[in-house]
Amino acid sequence: MNIGIIGLGDMGRLYAKAFAKAGYTVCGCDLPENRNKLEEELSPYKITIMDSGKEVSRTNDLIIYSVEADKMEAVVAECGPLTKYGAIVAGQTSVKHPEITTFEKYLPSDTQIITFHGMHGPGFEPAGQTLILIPHRASPDAYKRMYDLFNDIGSHIVEIADYHEHDKIVADTQAVTHVGFESMGTAWKSAGFFPWENASYLGGIDNVKILTTLRIFSYKAHVYAGLAILNPYAKQQVKRYAESESELFKLMIKEEAKTFRERLYRARDFVFHESRKPIMLNDTVMKEFSLSQKPEQQKPNSHLSILSMVDAWYHLDVNPYDNLICQTPPFRLRLGIAEYLFKNEELLEESIETALYDKTIRGDDLEFHSAVREWSSIIGYGDMEGYKKHFNDVQSFFDGRLEEGKKQSAELIRRLMVD
């Protein structure tokens, strides 16, 4: 099976190399100005760079569109009608609704549509990583060929029969997860400090929050913008997260302890009941990964971002353990630190007491509250450019620590995600 990849960005190149190493004939294309650099990088893998997506479409048995979600329609409109007779076409975007709509609109009726979603970033090789495989319009033989292909490169394949189900799960595992961490980053930027220099952010949970936030901001804005804005289920979930955060924040500033505590314990009992297999993050490992020079000065933290997430899961009637089939490292870590907090009653009570009565962290919680509102509004309005600008502003604030954060978070993920 000859494989052609239209769009050789970070993920396109990653999979092109994996296919080539597995013995497949691979070609691809990208913008003309990137050609020389791509030929230099990919020629050792015997990957051919073609002149255009049209040429890739005409000549390959499998065509993978690996382009930005908001550019997908324009590229498929240009290249799709020239698809080789009977070829398989797939997309690598994280949101499948617009992708499938575009394929149905522009691809010939004889085309087999079997799409996929690698649940990892370009910092991880596909081998051993979860990959979602979704047949849409395909013969059993074509589907088997796709399954065998990803099996050959060592992907952990999860089969989902319907792209609607995929997008619902991704809204929880990625879109809302990212907004939580992006809001933390925005809050720290607005407050004007790096969290590892603040005594309220020196615990094991905070090390995970900080490193995951840095990891997210070390990647490109368009990836997260597409996930949040183009997924029809994401807006509803982000809106609920913002509502949960706002309602909890109001109870905090009014010091309505009984209502606040009862609400959180109700959410705890819904999400973390004993029938669920716990993730069990290692406390010792979490404490190792501090960017601070003075971890012994740690103060209590309200962990409002985590309290809001668990409350939102309760109100959405979503149990995150059900969605671990489509987990990403940030989602697993987010669920892991929520579990760590809510299943430790002493720590949960410390968090509740701090949220209600500790005025030294109230200003930080106010910044977080404002940040969640900002991100929720941008996503609610469908403002793709506003999302990217907001993201890039925060990215610039952390610029000097992003590479270190990315490396440390990869090691943290490796250490914590061992089953």
Image (spheres, rainbow, N blue to C red):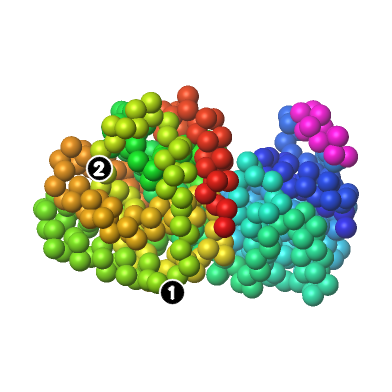
Q: Name the residue under label 2.
A: 300
Q: Earlier in the sequence, mark 2 or mark 1?
A: 1
Identity, as a three-letter code, of the amino acid under mark 2: Pro
Identity, as a three-letter code, of the amino acid under mark 1: Ser
Q: Number of labelled discs?
A: 2
Residue 231 placement (x, y as % from top left) = 50, 59
Q: In which quarter of the image is the N terminus?
A: bottom right
Q: Which residue lies furthest to the front in this view?
A: 284
Residue 154 placement (x, y as % from top left) = 74, 55
Residue at 38%, 26% (x, y): give it. Answer: 293
Q: In which quarter of the image is residue 386?
A: top left
Residue at 76%, 28% (x, y): give it. Answer: 37
Of the pair 243 and 125, the residue shown nearer to us: 125
In the rendered image, the vertical position of residue 218 relative to residue 107, given as above or below: above
Decide: few, some or many residues near mark 1? Use Cα within 10 Å; few <14, some 14-19, many ≥20: few
Q: Quadrant of the C terminus?
A: bottom right
Q: Which secondary structure is most common in the magenta stretch?
A: helix
Residue 268 placement (x, y as % from top left) = 32, 65
Q: What element carries label 1?
A: loop
Q: Does the magenta stretch include residue 40?
A: yes
Judged left or right of residue 193, residue 138 is: right
Q: Mark 1 points at which residue?
A: 275
Residue at 38%, 29% (x, y): give it. Answer: 292
Judged left or right of residue 262, residue 400 is: right
The part of the chain drawn in magenta is: 36-46
- Residue 34 in sight here: yes
- State the mark number for residue 399: none
Q: Does the CB distance between marks 2 and 1 fall below 8 Å?
A: no
